[in-house]
Image: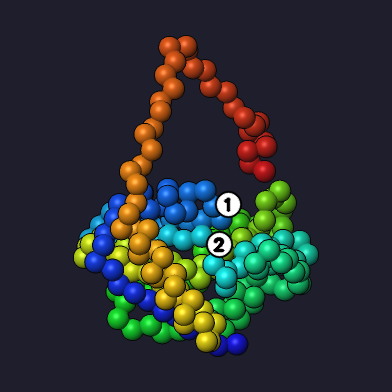
Amino acid sequence: MIFNIHSRKLTVYPDSERVFVHLFGSQPTAFWLDSSRVEPGLSRFSFMGDGTGPNSLLVQYSITDQKLTINCSGKTTHRRESIFSYLHRELERRYNCLEGLSFDFNCGFVGYFGYEIKAECGGNIVHQSPFPDAMFLLADRIIAFDHQEQVTYLLCLTKKGENSHANAWFEGIEKQLCNLPPLPPIELDYTHRKVSFRLSRSYQRYLE
């Protein structure tokens, strides 16, 4: 299957927090990527999106049995395979070189590798986590902010022949970005009572 990457550069440059709150804040799978190093050239871009796109995937992985759970448009499938080989193959299938961008991230997987993944890199499985050992969202629609040039980019990953889907999404998102409401006020709950702290788990449990 052939995939294409589409992009559109916008002169509108909205506040990124307003964009995330109003466009993605209510979604169960959403991301907002910023650089943790505030240095020239290293904290230039922000990326955000969610899992509502038609070509998005949510991938969860259990290392004990090398089980992948893949959700696509509400349909769940399972397979036995290393998370590394799966990501390598799926990224190659969707690889596109899009010229004219000032950044490399042009749709792809966003997520994490848990500590237990070390077992696939020569380590041993010592503990089992109640959470997925790896989880990745295939972001097929991305909003990118260039904080240096103060412009916004829209990126969309589509299957061959779905160009109209990308254009429709571009038009809809651009209208929303130009008409964002203010952020809701933050209501602070003050208390004059003394606040006490306690450990939620024992020292040994923390180490585990």
Q: Is residue 12 above or below residue 190?
A: below
Q: Nearer the viewer, residue 138 or 169?
A: 169
Which of the two labelled residues, at mark 1 and mark 2, occupies the earlier sequence position? 1
Q: Nearer the viewer, residue 146 or 38?
A: 146
Residue 46 in sight in this render: no
| Kind of residue sitting beneath label 2 | Gly
SS label for mark 2: loop
Q: Residues within 10 Å of mark 1 (few under 14, many from 20)?
A: few
Relative horizontal placement of residue 150, taking residue 188 as reference (left or right): left
| Kind of residue sitting beneath label 1 | Pro
Where on the picture, by quarter, is residue 72?
bottom right
Task: Give the residue pinned by disc 1.
Answer: 28
Residue 66's spot in the image, x, y percent? 74, 67
Q: CA distance from mark 1 to mark 2?
A: 8 Å
Residue 159's spot in the image, x, y percent? 54, 82
Residue 133's spot in the image, x, y percent? 66, 58
